[in-house]
Structures are given as C-alpha cells and as structure tokens.
Image (cartoon, rainbow, N blue to C red):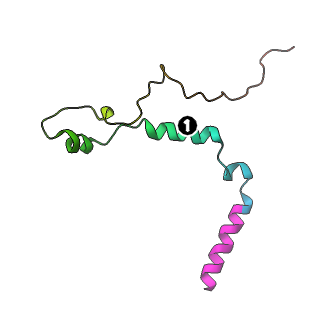
Amino acid sequence: MALLTLKLKRKLRRLKMASRKSKMASSKKRHLDRAKRQTKWAPFWTVLKKFGKGKKVHPSSITHVKRSWSRSKLKIKPRKTAKKYLG
C-alpha cells in the first residue's frame, strides 16, 4: 500500500511540473494526428486476407480515407507568423 501511494505521489509531482500546454494537445495537432492515422497504408497481410494469394493489389486500395497532399487539404489554419516587413 505504501509503495502504491509513493508511486501516485511521484506521478502527481510530475504532472504539476508539466505546463498546461504540454498536458492538453491543441485541436490542430489532434486533427493532424487523426489524418495521419487515416491515410496509412494497410498491412500487407490484409491484402492476402481480402483478395487471396494470387491477387496482386497495392495496400493503399484497402485504406478507408485516400488523400493526396497536393489535391485535398485538411482545412487547418496555418500558424501565425510575425510580419517580415515594417509598417
């Protein structure tokens, strides 16, 4: 029991030391993370499972969301940057 409380105390101390920003991910990062997960190709063995041994198909044909980075955007606002000119 004492060991458990000691571990909890250490965990709480670490959480207090971390900033609020680091604890709470921004919505922009969450959107980017989800988009990254959706566009990953399927593992090679799913092709065998779905189409069989004789069929040669690219794993990208199985993914749910297909995205081309040049064709379709995620509609996320760009980061605010300081103006490079005076005035």
| Figure check: 32 above or below 69 | below
Q: Residue 68 is drawn in which quadrant?
A: top left
- The residue at which mark 1 appears reads as 32
Relative image position of residue 64 (x, y in whole percent) = 38, 36
Q: Quadrant of residue 40?
A: top left
First to last magenta residue range: 1-15
Query: Three-letter amino acid code at disc 1?
Result: Leu
The one of 53 and 5 positioned closer to us in this rendering: 53
Left or right side of 42 for 26: right
Residue 29 place in picture, x, y as percent? 60, 40
- Which quadrant: the C terminus? top right
- Picture layout, residue 11 above or below residue 36: below
Q: Residue at x 77, y 24 (%)?
A: 82
Q: Quadrant of the N terminus?
A: bottom right
Is 42 placed left or right of 55 in the picture?
A: right
Q: Please tell me which residue is depicted at 67% across the width and 50% down the height of the picture.
A: 24
As for residue 7 lying within the magenta part, the answer is: yes
Give the vertical position of 87 relative to 31 (above or below): above
In the current view of this chain or complex, which residue is farthest to the right?
A: 87
Q: Is residue 72 left or right of residue 12?
A: left
Expressed as whole percent of the image width and height from the top left, the position of residue 76 reads 62, 30
Please check the rendered image and state whether residue 73 is part of the magenta-colored stretch, yes or no. Answer: no
* Quarter occupied by residue 6: bottom right
- SS of the residue at dot 1? helix
| Residue sitting at x 24%, y 40% | 47
Name the residue rendered at 16%, 40% in the picture.
Answer: 52
> Label 1 crowding class (10 Å Cα cut-off): few <14, some 14-19, many 20+?
few
Magenta segment, prevailing SS (helix, strand or loop): helix
